[in-house]
Image (spheres, rainbow, N blue to C red):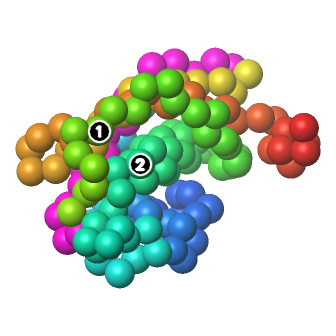
Amino acid sequence: MTTSIPPIEDLIPHRASMLLLDRVTAFGEKCAVGESLPTRGAWYADESGNMPAYIGIELMAQTAAAHVSLVKRMRGLPPKMGVLLGTRAYRSETGAFEAGVLLEIRVNQLFMESGGLGAYECAIVSGGAIKATAILKVFEPENVELFLQG
């Protein structure tokens, strides 16, 4: 794992309120660790001011995207846009992530095919306990605009 990591804004295209990941703290060829601090009063906050657990899928996706970006940087390649295809089994031990309590998002690449299809095993950890898990399917098409047009 390396610790020389650029700011998150240099790694993924998300901006303003859609940038949910605060930073990447570590990464390697097949894994990355990100952090997010849920904020009371954010657009996603529930009636108690906490982050609903379903937002965890996006935290995982942003961490996986940051991982892909970092690996490309390591190899001297330009970043490309990718998409989250989905997950079959997002499991959360909680209904919401508490505002002001740091979340650590861990992603481990299971595979990445030359055609751009990949999968990540993911976990969200808080206070030393696993709060949510999923396996995400991702895709990095050659031309994301054409892909999104169908």
The image quadrant that residue 75 belongs to is: top right
x and y percentages locating residue 81 in the rendered image: 70, 48
Q: Amino acid at mark 1?
A: Ser
Residue nearest the observer in this picture, 45 or 150: 45
Left-right relation of 93 to 11: left
The numbered mark at residue 92 is: 1
Main SS of the magenta segment? strand
Q: Which badge, 2 or 1, is on the more N-terminal residue?
A: 2
Residue nearest the observer in this picture, 37 or 47: 47
- Are the residues flagged by discs 2 and 1 in contact, CB closer than 8 Å? yes
Q: Residue at x 26, y 72 (%)?
A: 48
Q: Residue at x 9, y 44 (%)?
A: 128
x and y percentages locating residue 61 in the rendered image: 50, 44
Q: Amino acid at mark 2?
A: Tyr
Q: Residue at x 20, y 71 (%)?
A: 100
Q: Residue at x 36, y 41 (%)?
A: 32
Q: Which residue is outermost to the left?
A: 128
The image quadrant that residue 129 belongs to is: top left
For label 2, the residue is 54
